[in-house]
Amino acid sequence: MRYVMNKMKMGQKATPQPLLQTHGLRKSYSIGGERVEILRGIDLTVSKGEWLAVRGASGSGKSTFLHLLGGLDRPDQGGVQFAENEIFSLGNRRLNQYRCWSVGFVFQFYHLLPELTALENVLIGAMVGRSIVRWSRERNTVRRRAIDLLDKLGLSHRIHHRSTKLSGGERQRVAIARALINDPLILLTDEPTGNLDTTTGDQLLDLLQQFHQGGLAIIMVTHDERIASVAQRCVVLEDGQLRN
Ligand SMILES: Nc1ncnc2c1ncn2[C@@H]1O[C@H](COP(=O)(O)OP(=O)(O)OP(=O)(O)O)[C@@H](O)[C@H]1O
Ligand SMILES: [Mg+2]
């Protein structure tokens, strides 16, 4: 860190440090008895604090790719390195830690728990990564952070509403708060504006911009060119491969 600071003081540009890397990532599914290759060898490097958009047609494999990055599914071949650790070589405990602490994941269809309120859905994200002892020690602080996040995301008036009573855009924002509750280094978000009107979508992008300015790296899947243009870099998934 001191080295980076010194370089910056000397007026040189610090080399971006890789945060997440993929090597020859391949994934296929059996569809109708036939093996279909969805990802055919993907190499990607995302730096600390970078904002990357991944575009591609419907069915091109964007969600599949994001699930692999989040450690939610396993590739057939190739790997994902986070901070120089190969995540699929980690034991279950450490892989769970990666999912809970290093990345925040926002699913395309949110996957909120219907019986729980907005606040409870966010707190679930914090509970799963903590032991009972740690949870009882930190719950008040975490609760304050959850309320603060929901407030920042414009949901202070919906905190105690069940997720089934929320609109699509409100659910999307609860899912983002849940993904950010453990203060991850990278946010993986699947079509973050997919179900929003233009104004609400733009408000959400402004919020992501604020978190990004705070140092959060973002990988954002979208099929929308306009949304993708907000990111620092955009890649396109086509025929199972990424192109710039
Ligand atoms: N679990 C699965 N089993 C079989 N096939 C799957 C599975 N998950 C995805 N697929 C197939 O893989 C292909 C890519 O799916 P994926 O959801 O990754 O696409 P996408 O780019 O996210 O599409 P969209 O823009 O519509 O969300 C699709 O043809 C889909 O049917
Ligand atoms: Mg998808």
Image (spheres, rainbow, N blue to C red):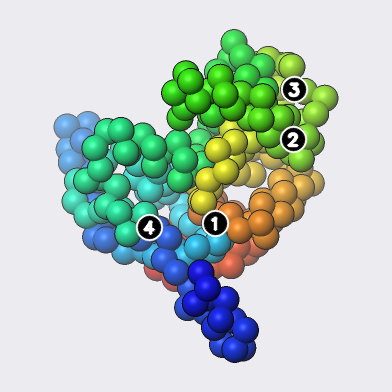
The reply to whether residue 205 is in sight is no
* Marks 1,4: beta carbons within 8 A: no
The C terminus is located in which quarter?
Answer: bottom left
Q: Disc 4 or 3, which lies upstream in sequence?
A: 4
Q: Secondary structure at mark 2?
A: helix
Cα gap from disc 1 to disc 4, whole angstroms: 13 Å
Tag 2 near tag 1, CB within 8 Å? no
Q: Mark 4 to mark 3: distance in Å?
A: 35 Å
Inter-mark Cα distance, 2 to 1 = 20 Å
* Residue designated by label 2: 148
* Residue drawn at point x = 71 percent, y = 30 percent: 144
Give the amino acid type for the residue marked by disc 1 in the picture: Ala
* Picture quadrant where residue 232 is located: bottom right
What mark, if any, has residue 159 been given in the picture?
Answer: 3
Q: Is residue 113 above or below residue 66?
A: above
Secondary structure, mark 4, is loop
- First of labels 3, 1 by sequence position: 3
- Select label 3 or label 2 by which is in front: 2
Mark found first going from the N terminus, 3 or 2? 2
**Residue 238 picture location, percent across and down:** 38, 59
Q: In this view of the protein, which residue sits in the foreground, 202 or 102?
A: 102
Q: Which mark is residue 217?
A: 1
Earlier sequence position, callout 2 versus callout 1: 2
Q: Residues within 10 Å of mark 2 (few under 14, many from 20)?
A: some
| Residue located beneath label 4 in the image | 83
